[in-house]
Amino acid sequence: MADQEIISRIKYLIKEMNYRQADFAKKIGVDTSNLSKYMNGRLPLSDSLINRIVVNLGVSKEWLEKGTDIPFAKHASLPVTTVPACDVETISMGTPVYDIDVTAGSMPRARMFADDLVVGHINLPDIISENCRIVRVSGDSMSPVIRSGDYIAVRELTNMQYIFWGQIYVVLLDDLRLVKYVRRHDDPNMVILRSENPNYDDMEISRADIRELMMVQHVLHLDTRN
């Protein structure tokens, strides 16, 4: 029974991180066919597999093995890539880059990802989701993880009832757009928004006030030097 519960949590990770099983296997350094056998119960789960998930993804071992704690007991690290800015405009395939600051302005959600706002594309193997979009951010509340002017690859959530606690999200409220860690609150109707910069206090908001959530999956520094 314990193995089946752990397998269920691994499947949850794969689904919520929007990985294909083969991509998940590559991320944790496991052979794809062996991961499939683990998932189907044909191979008993090993300490090595669990430790690979914990180390490579920053997952809480207590949560993975026992279901207690939260998936990311500590802030999960994000992959960071430096991309020459000139490359963005010359690539026609890959993840679209939008000429918007996702944390500023009052542009309607329906307009945010309009085709005429696409200024180029970035083709990186680590950004594997077909639903990802790349947008600019401003402000220093998430510095040094995300610096003002950085670009981030985001994926919209289809079901906001299932929040991947400890991850960084773009949070859209009626009058605010924020990039924050989303943490569990003692009140299930509330969430805690936490900054990386210690000069910013936590925010407690009602889940009902969240209009959209976009999971941040990658940070990109655009190098504008020629």
Image: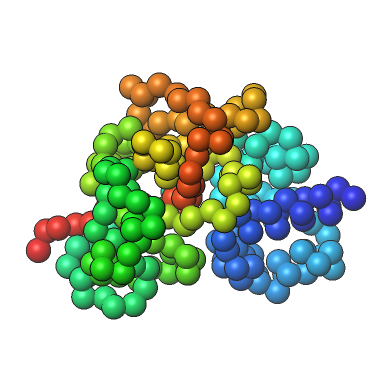
Residue pictured at 37% horizontal, 68% vertical: 95
**Quick check: can you spot residue 150?**
no
Q: Quadrant of residue 20?
A: bottom right
Residue pictured at 36% horizontal, 36% vertical: 176
- How many numbered marks appear? 0
Q: Quadrant of residue 179?
A: top left
In depth, the one of 65 and 224 nearer the eye is: 224
Where is residue 53 shown, x and y percent of the image? 63, 52
Where is residue 141 shown, x and y percent of the image? 33, 32
In depth, the one of 3 and 50 nearer the eye is: 3
Position of 33 relative to 185 (above/below)? below
In depth, the one of 208 and 143 nearer the eye is: 208
Lateral position of residue 221 relative to residue 187, left or right = left
Quarter of the C terminus within the rendering: bottom left
Lateral position of residue 51 relative to residue 138, left or right = right
Residue pictured at 64% horizontal, 24% vertical: 186
Position of 10 relative to 124 (above/below)? above
Position of 128 relative to 149 (above/below)? below
- Name the outermost residue toward the right: 1
Residue pictured at 47% horizontal, 37% vertical: 181
Position of 7 relative to 114 (above/below)? above
- Name the outermost residue toward the left: 226
**Quick check: can you spot residue 37?**
yes
